[in-house]
Image (cartoon, rainbow, N blue to C red):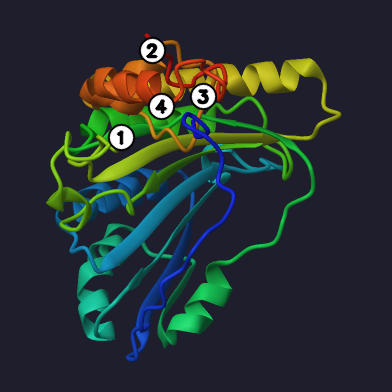
Amino acid sequence: AGGNFGINTSFTFDLVEVPQDGIAYYRFEWTGADAAFATLAAFDTLIQTAPAAFNGVIMAEATEVGTGDPSEAIHIMSRGQYVGPIDELRDLVAPLLEAATPDTQTVEEKTFWDMQRMIASGEPDPHSFGDLSRYSNRLLPENVTAELVDLLVSCPSRSADANGSIWSLGWVGGDVIGRFSRTETAYVHRDATTLLRPTTVWPNDAPESVGNELNAWTDSVIAAIAPHTPDESYQNFPNRAIENWQQQYYAENFDRLVDIKTAHDPGNLFNNPQSIPVR
């Protein structure tokens, strides 16, 4: 949803000192629908009160069934970092380990730059994908979490290159982001605790039905969580299927942004299907 007011032609960077102490890091993995329900719920509880120094995510993905039951073919991963002592991180993430016994678990210290190199990823091979995002600012009811797990079990495509996953991205909230009010900057989503994001992938050469079914699955995930979340979506994950994008991206800040757009780009030179319009 960028490109509303122009294009960047240059950048000036200020140097800042990186943390000198180690960064505490964790990564846990689980398998199965029961573990998915338990850990998604535990992470949702954790992220409601996590300190700003904690950055965590959790993902549950429908995987290839093979000869087993679809409920067994769900892969769950949670990882994150904490700018602080490793013992404090262990205490923070202990509820995840108590929720379900992990297949693998890692808790260790890394330097700032080692952490940066680990999180950085290369460009994937070209592929089709779809996702919608929904901010959340309170716990999802348990029956909704159970419905999300049921949707993973019934995901229409479950191969390595065509599948659906559900993410909770805990880096969108906290005391630092919440330091500003909703109307103080253009970014309105100041009171969120996490960003819920169903994500689908499929090969470019897959039959059209594969993408259509996965997009319908994504809509079902959003329909399950929408009644329990604000009507807001992350504008840096734009999706043209969002009809009321003005509300979901900008909410009460939209009218003021239209005024700014009209003042600085009255001819609407910089535009896209979901760009801020002029009056």
Earlier sequence position, callout 4 versus callout 3: 3
The residue under the point 79% across, 35% down is 203
Query: How many C-alpha atoms fall within 10 Å of the one at disc 4: few (<14), some, or many (≥20)?
Result: few
> What separation in Å lies between label 2 and label 1 (alpha carbons)?
15 Å
Whole-percent x, y for residue 193 in the image: 23, 45
Earlier sequence position, callout 2 versus callout 4: 2
Question: In the rendered view, does 94 fall on the left or right side of 158?
Answer: left
Query: Which label number is shown at residue 264?
Result: 4
> What separation in Å lies between label 4 and label 3 (alpha carbons)?
37 Å
Q: Considering depth in this image, is 261 or 121 the residue closer to the camera?
A: 261
Give the residue at mark 1: 135
CB under 8 Å between discs 1 and 3? no
Is residue 144 at all visible to an observer of this figure? yes
Earlier sequence position, callout 2 versus callout 3: 3
Whole-percent x, y for residue 48 in the image: 17, 50
User: Closer to the observer: label 1 or label 4?
Assistant: 4
User: Closer to the observer: label 2 or label 4?
Assistant: 4
Give the residue at mark 3: 218
Query: How many C-alpha atoms fall within 10 Å of the one at disc 3: few (<14), some, or many (≥20)?
Result: many
CB under 8 Å between discs 2 and 1? no
What's the residue type where badge 1 is placed?
Tyr
CB under 8 Å between discs 2 and 3? no
Q: Considering depth in this image, is 175 or 145 the residue closer to the camera?
A: 175
The residue under the point 56% across, 40% down is 7
Query: How many C-alpha atoms fall within 10 Å of the one at disc 2: few (<14), some, or many (≥20)?
Result: few
> What separation in Å lies between label 1 and label 3 (alpha carbons)?
15 Å
Q: How many marks?
A: 4
Earlier sequence position, callout 1 versus callout 3: 1
The residue under the point 34% across, 91% down is 20
What's the residue type where badge 4 is placed?
His
Give the residue at mark 2: 244
